[in-house]
Amino acid sequence: MSASDPGAAPVLTVEHLTVRSPTRTILSDVSLEFADKEVTGIIGPSGCGKTTFIRTLNRMIDTSPGLRVEGSVRYRGQDIYGRGVNPVLVRQRIGMVFQRPTVFPMSIYENVAFGLRLLRTEEETVESVVRRSLTRAGLWNEIGSNLDQPALELSGGQQQRLCIARALAIEPKVLLFDEPTSSLDPIAAQKVEELFGELKKDYAVIIVTHNLQQAARVASRTAFLYQGRLIESGPTEALFERPKESLTQQYITGRFG
């Protein structure tokens, strides 16, 4: 639950989530709640299931053949894996930004407008949403006068913020980030981190990060995964300074092994 509104219902509720491949169990019996208007960090060593976990939250996992999902993921009470639920609509409500910028080989403007075109949005509305989304992503002042420029000519950090703008354009309620700064230089990474403070005013933000300092800086709550299991979750400050589990203590102090 959100510290600012402890009585509010969670925007996402994960219950007994298990993900299996034909050869192994990737996630095992994970249960976790995510509050609206809050940043939640997901941490853990490489191979612990962080990326698989976040991809289950908007059914991106569907694009990985051979994986079987058990348990439930509920968005405002509705199981997104329920019968008849359209995964495209799920991803409209629960947007995702990936580790490496995934810009399309088209103009800056058309990159942001891409999802709106699929939704057959009127052009007048498209123009206003593109500007608003670029502004919210901290890009308008940098590139607003060059919207016809090919997006692939932008710097890596600008490309990642463009992907954030594209995600914002279709008006999601939840934003997922899978290690969004791991391929960026420190200055570009800082600009993306600064966005989280603004985005949480309007969205539930969930970020997978391998950077413990980043989780400490941006997340109100943090969850620690290890070997596909949720070991501990709670307020970030408490988890880092007073972990309840020895595995958490070992991980955050670098004494794994």
Image (cartoon, rainbow, N blue to C red):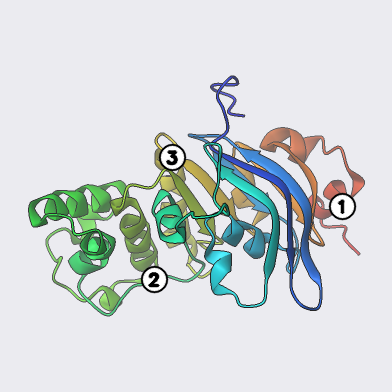
Residue beneath disc 1: 250
Q: Nearer the viewer, mark 3 or mark 1?
A: 3
Separation of residues labelled 2 and 1 (CA atoms): 34 Å
Q: Nearer the viewer, residue 30 or 253?
A: 30
Label tally: 3
Residue 229 is situated, as x and y percent measured from the top left of the image, at 80, 55
Residue 156 numbered mark, or none = 2
Does dot 1 land on a helix, a strand or a loop?
helix
Separation of residues labelled 3 and 1 (CA atoms): 32 Å
Residue 31 is situated, as x and y percent measured from the top left of the image, at 73, 44
Q: Does the CB distance between marks 2 and 1 fall below 8 Å? A: no
Mark 3 or mark 1, which has the lower sequence index?
A: 3
Q: Quadrant of the C terminus?
A: bottom right
Identified by mark 2, the residue type is Gly
Identified by mark 1, the residue type is Gln
Q: Nearer the viewer, mark 2 or mark 3?
A: 3
Residue beneath disc 3: 203
